[in-house]
Image (cartoon, rainbow, N blue to C red):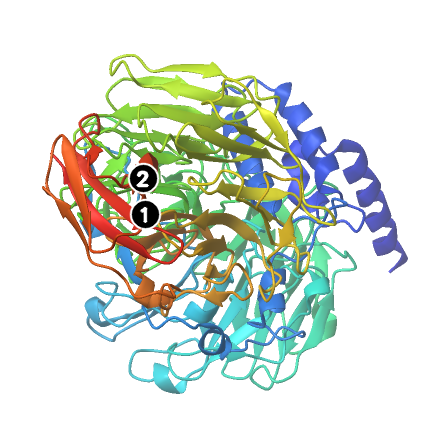
Amino acid sequence: MKNKILLIIIGAIAFIGQAQVSQNYKQIAKESEANYYTIVTQARQEFSEMDLSIRKNSQAKKQFERWVFYWQPRVNADGTFPNELQGYYNAGILSNTGELQKPFIAKSTQSNESWTNVGPAQADLNNNGYTNYPQMGRLNTLLRIKHPTTRSQDVLLVGAPDGGIWKSNDGGATWAPKLDFAAGIGVTDIRTVPGTTTANYLTRPIYVSTGDYDGQQSKSIGVLKSTDGGETFSSTGLTYTPDQQMTMGDIIVIDANTVFVAEKQFIKKTLDGGATWTNAYDSQFANSLIGRAAFNGTEIMFTSGQEVYYTDNYNNDVNWDAYDFTSNVNKKSVTTDANGDFYTQDQSGRIRKFNKTSRTFVDFGTIPPGYDSQSGYNQALVINNSLFLTGAVRGASSTNNGATWTNTLNEAWTGPTDSGVYVHSDHHRMGQLDTDLEFWSVNDGGLNYVTYASTTDIKPTTTYLSSNVIVTQSYSIAINPSANDDSYLMSNQDNDAFSKRNGSWYAVNLGDGIQSAINYNNADIRYASDQNGGIVQTNTGFQGQLNGNGNFVSVPSASFYFPLEMNKTNPNFLYAGSNDVYKIDATNAMNLTISPTNSGLTDLISIATHGNAIMAASFSSIKFSSNGGTTWTSIGLPTGTSGEISSVDFDGTNNNNMYVTYSGYNNNSKVFKTTNGGTSWTNISSNLPNIVTYEVMLKQNQSSEYLFLATELGVYFTNNSGTSWSRLGQGLPNVNIRDIEIHYTADKLVAGSFGRGLWEINIANSTLSSDSIDAPTVEVTVYPNPTSDLLNVKIADSKQYNYVMYNVVGGIVKKGTISDKGIDVSELAQNMYLLRVYNDATSVTKKVIIE
């Protein structure tokens, strides 16, 4: 034990002294004194000194900036890290000790309307000429329960980092989600009793290791268990409180009652089906990051970030011991071959074989060329007698015991002359199917089956199995609000962008898609951006324009996520934020230009625009421009708030009415409103749960105040100025909603989720409650309708009325007083508009067509 403690001390000193923050930020963040702001500053400095033209470096930077964007709205004000699932505890989905609390949705939802998932599924997606095309989204694990004779009757369960658990009863042809009430809880591993088949699986328990071991962006709530074949899940006796900040790895199921699972420091075991758990082994490292596991008979091997743990008899806890110590973090995959021998592969790609007699590891084969595990984010290994298969960013196979490798699963495949075949990048786990030449892989695109015709086959056959597992992680969405035609654009992590036009979805080549926009006067003109601030334009809705139409601008200093907003009255202008608010001019269809507005803001997080007015926010400041960004005025902030600004919006009819949301887990500090341009603010957070807020949006064409709020646990709304909030609608999983849009033509709200694709719901006034108007509605007639020049308004009332005319995105295009001279609409673009006629007692809205 003294030697063990000495090794720990030496390793910790070496780690602190040698590790680059840019390579080990996730591990550093687990230390008790870790500070988010310190990590970000130091890592960005290190990246600034790297050659980012080298793919491995640029990939590492992308992964880091993803991590930054994920943590920014969650981190505490002092830079310390809360539990990633803190919102689930705060909202009552999890008890204080981590047990699932299923009644949450029913007791918190007030609207009777139901959400509809609008996909897309992979079968709906036209690759659009994209040879290494996007797919549905990342999966972490697969449990295959075999049918004795027919693979199409297999029962499959897959786990996603943000999309919950999905089940198929027909070998992957159709799928259904099984953990919607906790869909944002990550899944690392799913296992059942060895030898289970479709004939007996309903009588065998299924165990789930929760969290996201690979991405480390979702903490574990412990082990879940299903006793009905994966239809429902409940907590076992192994659960965690928020302050335990637990990371959990693989699970080993020996029999119905005997289960081993990896924690940060301990290997836990249960002998009674999960009711009670004890420590089978203590690694002595508080953040050892024990994760991957394999077993053979009575032997089990777990790997960690610094050691490998092995026992030749799991029935005796004293048989466990540690091997292959490394001072720096070096995560490893592990597997066994047909002979029961164990192999590991570290972050560099080095494969080592375990000698059970000497209890030592020896190097085995060579490192696959171009191996890139992205600091252990994607690692998979399969060893058999005929063919070796390894997965990192790409997949490679070897027929000579790893002496040489061929890139047979090529994430960058562009055609028949390239090596291998296309399979999506970033392999998280691989396994063998029924023969030595059949494999499966779960990766950042989903689930693939891979079949080699022979050991020398370098172009295997692949089958994509998770077409209907909609776990797409969207950062932003856009809609065509001019018609109820289901036209959308969504930009997604790992899976580029999807653009729907004339009923068909088309792939867009972006990498990580970040932002989306659609011209509301011509829906074929669209904009999508990548993680480096590059914005591409299309004039065909991206149909036939995989990379856009050649018009391109780059937002200076954009670091992964940046806000992008289209002007609500002139769609030729867009505003992007990074180290300033930048104005993009698309007036010349063949030449996009971008210029700074000198707002004085940096680190932009949100932009709102109505008419010629712009409201822009950094994490700690708000500014307002009434003249399209020519000049800016500082807006006073609410007092007594905690956290950083996450979004802003304002009323197009009265710019003094503004709204701001704050991030972080700070109770009763979520949404604020001012009616005097920021001179004073009112806290309207009222009964909102203490969860992360992403975006507030005011429905612009109402006589009453309707606010919608995108959060980490769905969408909330209020129609009483924030006196009370309710969760909007039925059927939306408890998952991150990163972006929302109001479809004024169809009276729907559209929501982009991070982990469950695209959703929409009806938000007509009757959905939320009646529009609060004291006096009876008067009869209002507008004619001619459609019109092209003059619109007449006839009111069966002698009182004076005003009007506001909104376009399809809620932008105010005209306003004034009703008179017998009518309303001149000759300068308005051909489209649909909403005319609101009102006075102090009455409000009536009519649809008007300008042709």
Q: Between 778 and 707, which is closer to the camera in this rendering?
A: 778
Q: Where is residue 493 in the image (x, y as percent from the top left)?
A: 42, 42
The residue lying at 16 percent from left, 29 percent from top is: 544
Q: Quadrant of the C terminus?
A: top left
> Hey, which quadrant is residue 747 in on the image?
bottom left
Q: Where is residue 35 in the image (x, y as percent from the top left)?
A: 75, 42
The residue carrying pointer 1 sits among few (fewer than 14), some (14 to 19) or many (20 or more) residues within 10 Å by Cα, namely: few
Determine contact: label 1, label 2, CB under 8 Å.
Answer: yes
Q: Give the amino acid at mark 1.
A: Gln
Residue at far front of view: 798
Give the residue type at disc 2. Thr
The disc, 1 or 2, on the residue closer to the chain's N-terminal end is 1
Asked if 806 appears above or below 198 in the picture, the reply is above
Identify the disc placed on residue 800.
1
Q: Disc 2 designates what residue?
A: 817
Quarter occupied by residue 601: top right
Q: Where residue 420 appears, x then y in whole percent?
A: 28, 35
Disc 1/disc 2 C-alpha distance (Å)? 8 Å
Q: In this view, does 442 lie above or below 363?
A: below
In this rendering, the answer to whether 741 lies above or below 57 is: below
